[in-house]
Amino acid sequence: MLLVVENHSLPRTAAFFDLDKTVIAKSSTLTFGKSFYQGGLINRRAALRTAYAQFVFLVGGMDHDQMERTREYLSALVRGWNVQQVKEIVAETLHDLIDPLIYDEAASLIEEHHTAGRDVVIVSTSGAEVVEPIGELLGADRVVATRMVVGEDGCFTGEVGYYAYGPTKAEAVRELAES
């Protein structure tokens, strides 16, 4: 999905790009499964389940029910994870995992929009801890992503604070476009 918004009463314009299977070839969250396993955040069974989910996503995408089951599973899986550790694992493996997945055409389009003076916004159902560094890597000005609740201990509670999927994702894009 690419959406270019121009508001002629304001000099600012923006291009919105969906991330997974649009800018990159896979699910951004599921791509880090092996890294999370190696970092001790998930066990072998969870790593295998993540690999299977990536396969299903690549073959045909996920319908609404599959997305809901995946959200519930991932929310429970990350409960208790230290957010700083997640960010460190993503930072350490970002280039190795994500660089080969970026579609050349998408990278060129992002560059063209920046050259034309447009803001670039990356939109994804994946978590902000994954999407924000990918957005930075791509040169995005902003991202819209799912946000998990973080407790006072710096760990995920397992609750979703904002789920960037379906109507809520569309509404976030509309609100950002209007602003």
Image (cartoon, grey):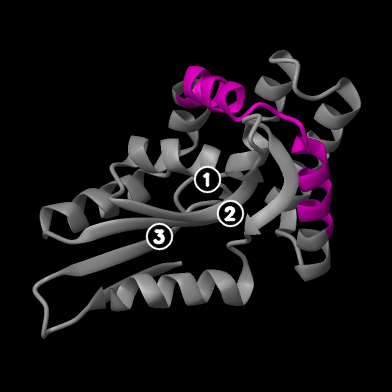
Q: Is residue 130 visible?
A: yes
Residue holding disc 2: 146
CA–CA distance in space, label 1 to label 2: 6 Å
What's the amino acid at mark 3?
Phe
Label annotation for residue 17: 3
Q: Quadrant of residue 9?
A: bottom left
The vertical placement of 51 against 120, above or below, is above
Q: Nearer the viewer, residue 62 or 160?
A: 160
Q: Nearer the viewer, mark 1 or mark 3?
A: 1
Residue 51 at what x, y percent from top left?
A: 78, 35
In the image as oriented, which residue stretches furthest toward the bottom?
A: 9
Residue at x-position 12% and y-position 53%: 115
What's the amino acid at mark 1?
Ala
Q: Main secondary structure of the magenta part?
A: helix
Which residues, given as a range, are shown in magenta?
69-94
Q: Quadrant of residue 135?
A: top left
Secondary structure under the numbered disc 2 in the rendered image: strand
Label 2, residues with CA under 10 Å away: few <14, some 14-19, many ≥20: many
Secondary structure under the numbered disc 3 in the rendered image: strand
Q: Is residue 28 left or right of residue 45?
A: left
In the image as oriented, which residue stretches furthest toward the right?
A: 45
Q: Are marks 2 and 3 in contact (CB under 8 Å)?
A: no
The vertical placement of 12 against 56, above or below, is below
Label 1, residues with CA under 10 Å away: few <14, some 14-19, many ≥20: many
Label annotation for residue 32: none
What's the amino acid at mark 2?
Thr
Residue 100 at what x, y percent from top left?
A: 47, 30
Q: Are marks 1 and 2 in contact (CB under 8 Å)?
A: yes
Residue holding disc 1: 128
